[in-house]
Image (tube, rainbow, N blue to C red):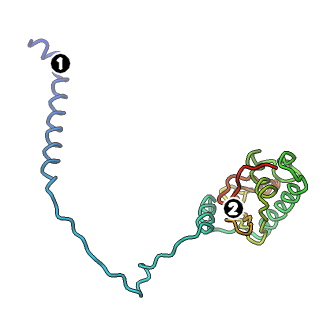
């Protein structure tokens, strides 16, 4: 027995220390569990208190904020020159999508500036325009800087009467003039093909 204790002395010390720490933890838990009376204050909201006024955020405002926060630098602006490049690329891309006339004919190409976008995002973009009849609002285009020197980020707004706005965000490579659609937020897009 003495030999066994000598051989396993380290294990016995570790187990003893663990038992001591467990005992201390249980003791603290029991002594700190004294019932406390809950404190409650009743306040009467005043009409002049601006913090008591709650404004409800519309679905469009929430979708816009969500889309805007997907950008790397959402509250910065890019140069007018780069904004004009993005504007021109989107005009050409949307014209190409509308010329195609059908979802199956829309592909991301260098000519329509969508070659850097994944096929699924190109199809979704085309679905919003062709099937769901959303309109591109070039005046609402936002272009922000990004962490890369040859890339800016964009937020475009697509609108339709009676529906929530649809927002697409992504990257625009200023060297090769290509659009990379990354995310979309909002809108009643659905999955109906015609």
Q: CA distance from mark 1 to mark 2?
A: 67 Å
**Given this view, does label 1 or label 2 mark the residue nearer the observer?**
2
Task: List x then y, in percent, for residue 62.
Answer: 58, 65
Q: Is residue 19 left or right of residue 141?
A: left
| Label annotation for residue 85 | none
| Residue bearing mark 2 | 167
Q: Residue at x 15, y 33 (%)?
A: 19
Residue 2 in picture, x, y percent from top left: 8, 13
Residue at image point 76% right, 57% down: 128
Residue at the farthest bottom position? 48
Residue farthest right in this picture: 99
Residue bearing the label numbered 1 = 8
Instruction: Give the side of residue 52 with respect to residue 193, left or right.
Output: left
Task: Judge left or right: residue 91 versus residue 47.
Answer: right
Dot 1: what SS?
A: loop
| Position of 106 relative to 72 (above/below) | above
- Could you tell me which residue is drawn at 88 percent across and 55 percent down? 96
The crowd level at tag 1 (other Cα within 10 Å; few <14, some 14-19, many 20+) is few
The number of numbered discs placed on residues in the rendered structure image is 2
Which residue is pictured at 71% across the width and 55% down the height? 189
In-front residue for pair 148/114: 114
In the rendering, at what x and y percent does residue 59 appear? 60, 66
The kind of secondary structure element at disc 2 is strand
- Give whichever of 159, 131 is nearer the camera: 131
Outermost residue, left side: 2
| Relative to 7, residue 122 above or below | below
From the viewer's side, name the closer residue of 55 and 162.
Answer: 162
- Whichever of callouts 1 and 2 sits on the residue coming sooner in the sequence is 1
Image location (x, y in percent) of residue 24? 14, 42
Quarter of the picture containing the N terminus is top left
Disc 2 crowd, CA 10 A, few/some/many (<14, 14-19, 20+): many
């Amino acid at each position: 027995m003495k030999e066994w204790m000598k051989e396993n002395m380290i294990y016995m010390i570790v187990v003893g220390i663990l038992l001591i720490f467990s005992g201390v933890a249980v003791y603290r838990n029991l002594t700190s569990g004294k019932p406390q009376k809950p404190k409650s204050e009743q306040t009467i909201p005043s009409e002049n208190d601006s913090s008591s006024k709650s404004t409800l955020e519309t679905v469009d405002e929430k979708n816009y904020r969500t889309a805007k926060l997907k950008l790397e630098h959402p509250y910065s602006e890019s140069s007018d020159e780069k904004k004009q490049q993005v504007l021109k690329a989107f005009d050409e891309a949307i014209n190409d999508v509308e010329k195609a006339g059908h979802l199956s004919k829309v592909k991301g190409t260098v000519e329509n500036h969508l070659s850097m976008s994944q096929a699924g995002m190109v199809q979704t973009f085309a679905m919003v325009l062709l099937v769901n009849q959303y309109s591109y609002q070039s005046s609402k285009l936002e272009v922000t800087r990004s962490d890369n020197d040859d890339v800016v980020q964009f937020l475009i707004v697509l609108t339709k009467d009676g529906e929530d706005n649809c927002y697409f965000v992504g990257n625009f490579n200023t060297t090769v003039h290509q659009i990379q659609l990354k995310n979309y937020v909002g809108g009643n897009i659905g999955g109906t093909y015609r």
